[in-house]
Amino acid sequence: MERTIFRPHSRHMEYPGIRIVPIDSPLCWLRDGATDLRRSWPISLGYGVVFAGLGSLLAGYAWSQVHLAMAMTTGFLLLAPFLAIGFYDLSRQIDAGMRPSIRHSLIAWRGNASSIGLYAALLIILLIAWERMSAILVALFLTDNTLAVESLVGEVMTSGGHMAFVVAYTVFGAVLAAVVFALSVVSLPMLLDRKVNVATALMTSLWAVRENPQVMLLWAAIIVALIAVGYLTYCVGLVFFFPLLGHATWRAYRDLIEPSLG
């Protein structure tokens, strides 16, 4: 089906065309991502086990303190677009008619190492900023900064205590998550696939979100829902959902962005 293409213009950058996609596209991305997952399942699920284990260790390490637990859990999600680079490359290998290779996926970043490294540095800066903001929110709203997560949840559910903290943390977290999402929708797959700089990739991602707002809202909701299920199953669900979302993100990139610049 022929799709409308938006072509951003800039005097200083050359952007690819942005496709305007149907509202149900995220479901198609998940379907195609699941197909990629089946074709590379030993490698993809192996990565999934590693990342689910990492997420579980981080949460478990800091679970006794609200600040650390929430900062590390949400921080892990902020780094997720970068951690999923292996899945993007596995899907790219499938597109190229190659047999999925773990070695290829581990070194794929070397094709555009400087830009991908700069992207990773940007995510780390955002993570540090969020950790500091998290600490400030805890200090402002909680009298006991060593409060355990179970105690906080119990008080919120039974008496409505600490609701100001919950609301403030949710608002600030949602704003940061929205920024990272908008910057990451297609940027890292694009950096992996093309020899472009970070600014071009980030701006292309923002254009894609701007031109497909309803689709991106649905896609973000699906990501949050699947990751939440993953965490609620003590990270066991992440073994499957993290690879699925990684492969689906590559499919989103291929659907949203024209195959060549210009």
Image: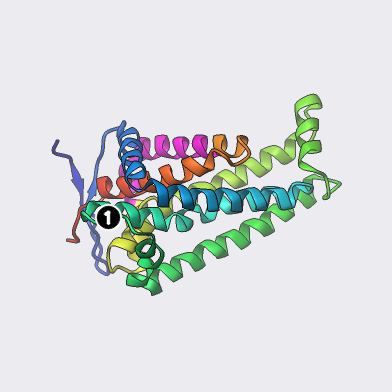
Residue 11 vertical placement versus 240 (above, below): below
The kind of residue on which mark 1 rests is Arg
Q: Quadrant of residue 116?
A: bottom left
Residue 161 position, x and y percent, is 80, 32
Q: Is residue 34 above or below residue 131?
A: above
Q: Residue at x 20, y 55 (%)?
A: 259
Please tell me whether residue 133 is drawn above or below residue 158 in the rendered image.
Answer: below
- Residue depicted at 31% across the width and 55% down the height: 100
- Residue 107 location, quadrant: bottom left
Read off the residue under disc 1: 99
For the C terminus, the image quarter is bottom left
Q: Residue at x 35, y 39 (%)?
A: 34
In this image, 146 relative to 50: left or right?
right
The verdict on residue 225 being magenta is yes
| 27 and 96: which is toward the camera | 96
Principal secondary structure, stretch drawn in magenta: helix
Q: How many marks?
A: 1
Left of 140 or right of it: where is 15? left
Residue 151, how many percent across, how many down?
A: 81, 37
Q: Is residue 129 left or right of residue 115?
A: right
- Residue 176 in view: no
Left or right: where 234 falls relative to 160:
left
**In the current view of this chain or complex, which residue is farthest to the bottom?**
114
Residue 240: horizontal and vertical position, in percent? Answer: 47, 41
Q: Secondary structure at mark 1?
A: loop
Q: Does the segment drawn in magenta span residue 188?
A: no
**Furthest residue toward right:** 144
The colour scheme applied to this rendered structure is: rainbow
The residue range painted magenta reads: 207-227
Q: Give 234 or 21, whichever is nearer the viewer.
A: 234
Q: Within 10 angstroms of label 1, few (less than 14), some, or many (20 or more) residues?
A: few
